[in-house]
Each structure stands twice: as C-alpha cells, then as structure tokens.
Amino acid sequence: MDGKTVTAAKNGCEGCNQEAFDEIGNIIDLYKDKEGSLIQVLHRAQGIYGYLPLELQSYIADGLGLSLSEVSGVVTFYPFFKTKPQGKHTISICMGTACYVRGGKKLVETIRDLLGIEVGETTEDGMFTFVVERCIGACGLAPAVMVDDTVYRQVDEEMLKAIIEKYRKGEVSA
Amino acid sequence: MAEQIKTFKQLEDIKKAYLAAQEKYDYIVYVCGGAGCVAAKCDVIRKTLIDETQKAGIGDTVSVVQTGCMGTCAVGPVMLVTPGNIFYTELTADKVKKIVTGHLAGGKVVEEYTYYDAALDKHVPKMDDIDFFKKQVKIALRNCGAMAYNDIAAYIARDGYQAACKALTELSPQKVVDEVMASGLRGRGGAGFPTGIKWQAAHDSKGDRKYMVCNADEGDPGAFMDRAILDGDPHSVVEGMLLGGYAIGADTGYIYIRAEYPVAVERIGDAIDQARAHGLLGKDIFGSGFDYDLEIRIGAGVYVCGEETALMASIEGNRGEPRQKPPLPFQKGLFGCPTNINNVETLANIPAIVKNGGKWYAQYGTEKSKGTKVFALAGDVVMTGIVEVPIGTPMREIIFNICGGVPDGKKFKAVQSGGPSGGVITDLDLDVPTDYQSLQQLGAIVGSGILIVMNEDTCMVDSARYFMEFIREESCGKCNACRLGTKRMLEILERIVDGEGEEGDVELLEELCEVVAETSLCGLGQTAPNAVMSTIRYFRDEYDEHIRDGICRAGVCFTQRDKKAYPQRLRGRVL
Ligand SMILES: Cc1cc2nc3c(=O)[nH]c(=O)nc-3n(C[C@H](O)[C@H](O)[C@H](O)COP(=O)(O)O)c2cc1C
Ligand code: FES
C-alpha cells in the first residue's frame, strides 16, 4: 500500500486522535513489507495510542493488507494488548508462584479494598488500572508489585497503601 | 564508523587496551544492576558512589561499573570492590558514603557492611570465601555480574567473540556441530533435548533459507534466570546465536523476548547494534563470506507462546497456538523453512563450549547429564536469587549449603522443581543428584531450573490448585483434552480446598491426569498433571485430611480463597 491509500484509510476514522494515527501510519509503512510484522506494529501502536480500539485495529488492518478479523483475532489472543483505555498508572500485583506463596493474594484484596475495583478494571477518575501478572521475573523479591515500569519488592499491605498514596498525590509522574 | 573486527588479533588488541585502561584505576567497583537490585534502587547507589568519590578527590582513581545480576537478589543492592573482591550488601546511600571514605579513600574494608552469613553469624567480606559463591561453577553466567553488560569491549576483554572468530575462520559448520555434540549440552528451556542432535538435524536439512530462533519467552512463573543472562550478558546470547546460525547455515536469527522484560529488550537491542557496528553481524562476518543478522520479536503475554511451534506462529504475526509435531521445526519451521530453536541459557553456553571445546564442558556434571545448570531460587529460602552448579549437585547442597536454608526458623516442607510442569521433592529425597533422569524418577523435572522452596506454612493441595489454575488460564483452548481436562481438574481441586471434597476425588483426579497427559496436543497439556500427581504421590495424607477431616494443616484452605483473583482474562476465549 502506498502513502496515499494509508491517508485515505486514516480519514475514514472520525473522532480519532489524528496525530497519533499519522504516527502509527508511518510505522505501518515501515513494517508493511516485512514478513509477519503485525504483532510488532500492534506493540508500537499501543505504545503511541495507549490501547487498541476497533477503529485503530481496522486502520492497521487496512495498512497491512489484512482483514479486520485477522487483526482482531491476534489482538484478543494476547492479553498484553488492551482494547479499552487504561488508567494513568497501571498497578500490577504479581501472582507468580513465588509471590503467591509469599502473600501476593493478600495484596490483591488490599487493592480491591483501597480502590474499589476488580482485576482488569480502571478507577473512575482514570487514575489506576489494576491487573494481576503471572510472574514479572522478580521472584527473588516476592511479593512484588509493579506500578507502570517500577518494581517494588517485598511489599506488605502498609507499603502498598503508601505506594498508592504517593501516586495519587502525583509525587511520581507517569 | 566503528572499527570493523575481522581478525583474532583485533580482538586481542581490544582486550589488551581494555585491561590496560582498567589497570590505571586504584579500585574498580562493580555495582549490580540486575533486576532485583534495580528494584532495590541501585541507581541511587551508583550515583552516590560517583558523587562521593568526586567529593573525596578520588574520582579519577575509582572506576564505577554497572553489571548484570550477581545472583544475590535477596540482599540487594550489592557491589563488589576490586582488588580484594570485597562484597558489600544491602547498601544505602549512607553506607556508600562510609565505604567511600573508609575503604576507597582510606584503604580499610568497612566490614560491618560486607556480606553477613547468618549460619556462621559473622561477616564474610571476601567474595571468594562466601559459601554462596564458592560452591558455584559459572559457565552460562560466566560474565553475569562480572563486567559492564553494555560494553562490547568489556565482553571482548573476557574473551568474547573469540569463539565466533575461531568458528568462522577455522572451523567448518559441521565441526561446530561436533563440538556441541561432544559437550553433551542439553536444552535448558525445559525439555532437555540434546542440543547437538538438534543442530545436526538442522544442519543436514535442505532449504533455501534457514532460521535460528532464541526462545527468550521465559514464561514459567518463578523463572528469572534467562532474564539475568539477557540483562547481564546480552553479547553471549548474540554470540551463541551467531554460532548457531553458522553451524546450521541460517541467514537470519530471531530473538523472541517476552514483553514483560522491557529492560532485556533494550539491552539485547543495544548489543545487536554494537555487534552490527563492529561487523560481527551483517555481511561477510570475520571476512569468512558468512552473512547473518538478528532481529528481535516481542511477545505479548501468552505462556503457551514459549512452546516452540506456538512461538514460531507468534513470530509470523499470528495467534500463538501450538500445532501438532511432527513436522519438527528442523523439518518445517518458521515461514515453512528449516529452523532451530534454542533457549537463552542453552545459547549462552555455546561460546564457552566452542572456545574451550566440547570435552571441556563435558567434564562437569554427571555421566548422562553434562555441564552446569542455572537455578532460580525463590520462596522460603534465605538467599533468593540465581545460582549455577554442576548438574547432579544434590538439592540439599543447593538449598541449604549454597542458599542458606529456610529463614525465620521455619521447617522445610518441599521444593517445587520445574514450575507448572514439574513436581515436588521432599526432605527424604534432598540428597538425590539433580540430574535429568534422577529428578524424573522422583516425579519432578529439572525443567527450566525453577526452585520454589516451601516451608511448613504452605499447603500442598493449594499449591497443586495454584498450578492447575495457571495452566487452565494459559491453555490456549485448541485441543479438548487440555481445555476441558484442566478445567475439570481445577474444579475438583477447588472443591477440595473449599472444604467440599468428596471420597473418590483423588482417584478421579488421578484418572484425569492420565488422560490429559496422554492425549494433549502440546507440552502444556502433556505436563499439566505433573504438579497434581506429584503432590498426591508425596502428600496424599494432606488430600485425605482436607476431604475427610476438613483440616488444612498449613492453615491456608477453607477460608479466604479468593475466587475473583483470576477473572477470565480478556482473551476472546469461550470457556
Ligand atoms: C507450554 C510450554 C512453554 C514453554 N516455555 C518455554 C520458555 O518460556 N522458554 C524456553 O526456552 N522454552 C520453553 N518451552 C520449551 C520450548 O518448546 C523448546 O523446547 C525450547 O525452546 C527448546 O530450546 P532448548 O532445546 O534450548 O531448551 C516451553 C514448552 C512448553 C510446552
Ligand atoms: S513470582 Fe512474582 S516475580 Fe516471579
């Protein structure tokens, strides 16, 4: 697909963030001749847009010459790809083996109590998304909690409260 | 443009220049920058060191180097001061200030901040005297924690790329395969298949194009050894991939890294760029006419993508579902071409094997399981972290003598070896050698090298339920045995831990285990029953207590099990 068709596809989306779509369009151009690059494009697109709404999936499908169902099939298979907007901060509680045996599950309850949301949900103010991970590879430090890209080690309930407070107050930027 | 490295002499010269530059310093301080220490804020330690040495006027005589994981994650942040090999642990900015004035400026070791051995109840300042380090043999981890991970010259100074140079300029591809065959190296990704045989098959298969793939998906919960290598010694993976590509005749290699390891992605990416800039990837490498390059592919959070056929599907940009084997990857792999897939740790061993010879590697280990294995220790053990030991080293030696045993005066109950596809080993069998055959006989596996130590507060039935829940969640749903079988098994286990178990449940579980193991499509389902079978084998009485007497001796079950902890992940699955 040449640059022109990409633009045409782009214009098809009303109410989308045009700038982000343009940027993603450039990435598609970069990858479209490489074999099997859909997943890499999705990674980059999510990095730019924050999540992968259907309009964006369809835009990527057009750009790479795939059907929307092919793209959707891939997006929904991999839990790393999000189809809903995410909170400003993502709190991941590790529930890998090491963290599980060392109290990860208490931390899940703590978050639920503190934020009033279930796993996979985002707080109403858009501040926090709460997820559980299978293992973040910090097992030597169990139980581990990750907020965005920062890992906190040997976390207990009190620490967790303090951590959330810190982010809420904006003492740590996104 | 960076210097194009074409000859052995150039490698030697870079090594000499690097070592000479190091000679000029009074002290070299290696600050661990492994994942554990990063989480423990080692960046503050490094910055304080640099600031304080400047202030003390010794900034020019002390070199501060950031390394990969030294293995002692439990006591991070850590650093090593040479000469003297003094090992400081659990550092804070204040401690660092005192070490700068006392040791680096004053020449006197600050003993109270050095490594503390709880068993001996004293500080052991010198790394060489510490049991944790003394009893290890590091081959895959040879550079991890011992050099700057981000500097190709540091890698070359530790004889890096010598193996590649030797292979490409002196050895035929067949000769490289022969060395790997002679080493007896077996795949460290879990299945333990002999690497030499796999390479021979890929070498012999015909195709216009062939591919080499590095499996850096490390999905087993509790595994973090591949990450230590990727973060701490990325060049050894690059060199391993180069040697593999040459041996089998590939022109492209893919490194498939899980998205949960952004640091590893970055560091491997940098290492590839550096290698390419020096002509160690690309066209006509070492003037041999061999062309080869590497690409990174990032996973997206699916465990089964660590299985080789699923992984290839994912690299191709598709849903990462496994398929029936054969055809094996060497017959029909990536994009339909002959492909060889190896694990990170397997590949990290390759440069050392090619450089020193297969025979050298085979001197370590047991009769049938050669070499060393990296283990990741977690759970109820004093030194959670990473160790590398000759294969066959008994579990007791690893857990108690090297890693300090169970903390807080608690009793050892079992060690879970091999993760979701492994099993438990109890007190009775701790002296059995940890080789592939012996562990299999015990119903456990070496697997990827995960050791989760469990104390008396762990319920074995709940741990079986935990692993089954993991597998059920991660089952891709393609084959019935795995999709439905794991669901049924999980239901029974949940019933038991909720206090609703019935007579006959254990027998039913055993029957299901057999069916699922025999009829599943891929390794995920085939090994799914292991954790259940193994706990039934060694802890049948605990199952019975749950079912008959409503007792959980660890005090874990019947109460707070959190049914909502793992809601169905948003993953378009029906079940
Ligand atoms: C469900 C499942 C998950 C796997 N995950 C991994 C993994 O994360 N890393 C890995 O190296 N091998 C993993 N494997 C093993 C690979 O299929 C394959 O055997 C391995 O990458 C081969 O490399 P090796 O011979 O060097 O061990 C997994 C296998 C199965 C069945
Ligand atoms: S189990 Fe939590 S980081 Fe691995």
Image (cartoon, coloured by chain):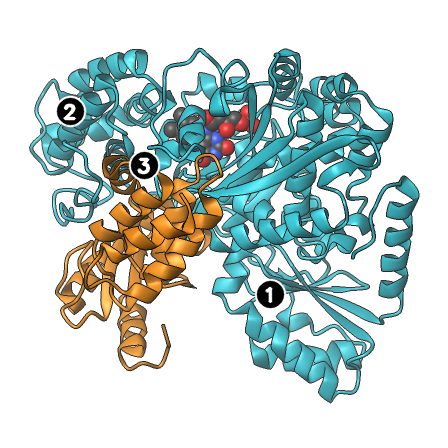
Residue topped by disc 1: B89
Name the residue tied to disc 3: A66
Residue at horizontal 14%, vertical 61%?
A117
Q: Is residue B569 left or right of residue B113?
A: left
* Element under disc 2: helix
Q: Nearer the viewer, mark 3 or mark 1?
A: 3
Q: What's the residue at 65%, 34% (across, down)? A: B241
Q: Give the residue type that dot 2 points to.
A: Arg
Q: Look at mark 2 in the image and give the residue it sits on.
A: B488
The colour chain B appears in is cyan
Q: Quadrant of the N terminus of chain B?
A: bottom right
Camera-nearest label, 1 or 2: 2
The first of marks 1 and 2 along the sequence is: 1
Q: Quadrant of the C terminus of chain B?
A: top left
Q: In orange, which chain?
A: A
Q: Chain of mark 2?
A: B
**Callouts 3 and 1 on one subunit:** no
